[in-house]
Image: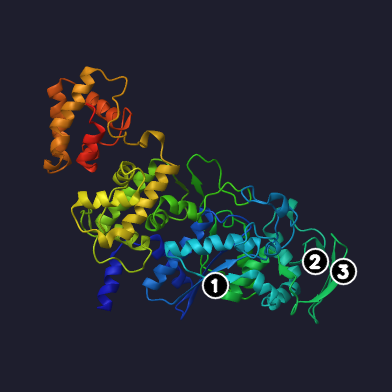
Amino acid sequence: MEQKANNNRNMRPMHWADEAALRVIKEKGEKDLYTCASGITPSGTVHIGNFREIISVELVVRALRDMGKKVRFIYSWDDYDVFRKVPANMPMQEELAKYLRFPITMVPSPSGEAKNYARYNELKVEHALPLVGIEPEYLYQAEKYRASEYAEGMRLALENKDELKKILDKFRDEDHKIEGEWWPVSVFCKICNKDETQIDDWDGGLNLLSYTCNACGYKDTVDLRESAVVKLLWRVDWPMRWAHEKVDFEPAGKEHHSPGGSFDTARVISKDVYDWDAPSSFKYDFIRLKGMSGKMSSSKGDVVDLSELLKVYTPELVRYIFVGTRPNTEFTISFDLDVIKIYEDYDKTERIAFKTEEAKDEVSYQKERRIYELSQVNTVMPNTAPYQVPFRHLCNLIQIADGDIDKALEDLSRSANAPLAEQLPLLRSRALCAKNWIDEYAPEEFCFRLRAPGSVAPASFGEKEKAVVRALKENVIAKIESFADEKSCAQAIYDTAREQGVEARDLFKISYNALIGKDQGPRLASFLMSIQKEKLLGILSEY
């Protein structure tokens, strides 16, 4: 049975996450435990560009586990970094500005829900990630530094500071080489908490580091084994932690993976100073938002985070967007009409995965099946194909129900003529996204509201238009339940247009104006069949 499963896996085309997982095994060899890492400084909103790294790691973790490997998935909050700038989207701008140059864990929280500024940003991510099936082990660097867990790593850096300087300069041009005295660590002043300090001396034998604060003038000598104020510079901190946590895989953005960039320097430092081979890696590209120029920036505050994305896309759709795109490909996330297309693409992948729609060949089937598997929040595939409701249709149902999701789902259950109780959680999740999209992002031409029952005919209607509406009531709406499907209803609509001597497009325009006060609307046959007959007749009762 196991051999058969392996053979089936070998037959399927390799997803990029599977390719990366095999590369980790090849580069690191067979191990009892593989450690996969990600992390960021919570200096501002953790946006969906940052999320790309998180989910990229999680997908490789899943792929390794699917291969039977034991994996540790760690996510580091670099919350002992310096607070350099107040992001534009943060409240309390003037108050936060008082804490520039402090460690971000000593900056006050913009709300009472968190104990400090770093935690304020961390909690948003930690609450959202489980919704998309991502639950790493969180490491908090402020806690680790303050507990002197990295004392040995700092000591090694200080002992090898000249070597570190050579490594860093090797990757710099002449205009950016390090000049004068250089230290691989920085110090937060014990008195004013700022990092505006200079290091005066280090007694390697006793692990004693002396510093002077340029902000307040305070001088002190601290023991690395007990100090809570010293940390490594990030270009040294990163490879130190690779060795400390025994990291086997960690991706990085393309700016870090550029030739001579931070990953190249970290690779050498990791091996030469900390005796640890750099992790297997790949670079990931930027994500852009439709209509926004340039990349997102937490410090500038022009960002969209995972919670915002989940307002419009269900958790499975969020995963699908990233699963289906190679990490080294730049792509755009849209909140306009493209949303409908993305839902349609996902639904097609689902149908192929459950073989309710035929793939063009076995390779295509296996590819779509793997994408669908990795898009699921749960690692276990559903036994049966979920009941599909096209996103566009769901948007129409919600607008027909005046935004009442319960009513829309009730109408759906009635029209589907099928038991949907088991499907309600998924349907409700999609319906909520549809409502959010309509309320906040959908273009005006897509939105509508049914006219009140007994509404007076539009001023533009003459006797001819009113006659068309009366004919629509008699030939289509009065017998709406008799139509077997949308096609037969559409045929009755076209027949009515011919009977009234008008073009079909004119009948459509008249119908939409009578029902929603607009020249255009959803496909008319589907639209009429989605609304209860009594409600339709009530709206058109004045004709």
Q: Are marks 3 and 1 in contact (CB under 8 Å)?
A: no
As helix, strand or loop, the secondary structure at mark 1 comes to loop
Task: Specify the label residue 189 is tagged with.
Answer: 2
Amino acid under disc 3:
Lys
Residue at 24 percent of width and 31 percent of height: 540
As helix, strand or loop, the secondary structure at mark 3 comes to strand
473 relative to 84, above or below: above
Q: Label 3: how many residues lie within 10 Å, few (<14), some (14-19) or many (20+)?
A: some
Q: Quadrant of the C terminus?
A: top left
480 relative to 500, above or below: below
Residue at 50 percent of width and 39 percent of height: 291
**What residue sits right under mark 3 in the picture?**
219
Residue 121 image offset from top left, x and y in percent: 59, 59
Task: Specify the label residue 460 is tagged with.
Answer: none
Q: CA distance from mark 3 to mark 1?
A: 37 Å
Q: Quadrant of residue 58?
A: bottom left
Amino acid under disc 1:
Val
Q: 11 left or right of 276?
A: left
Q: Are marks 1 and 2 in contact (CB under 8 Å)?
A: no
Residue 16 image offset from top left, x and y in percent: 40, 60
Q: CA distance from mark 2 to mark 3?
A: 9 Å
Between 520 and 349, the one lying in front of the other is 520
Can see residue 270? no
475 relative to 187, above or below: above
Mark 3 or mark 1: which comes first in sequence? 3
Mark 1 or mark 2: which comes first in sequence? 2
Mark 2 or mark 3: which comes first in sequence? 2
Q: Quadrant of residue 463?
A: top left
Between 18 and 101, the one lying in front of the other is 101
**What residue sits right under mark 1 in the picture?**
247
Q: Quadrant of the N terminus?
A: bottom left
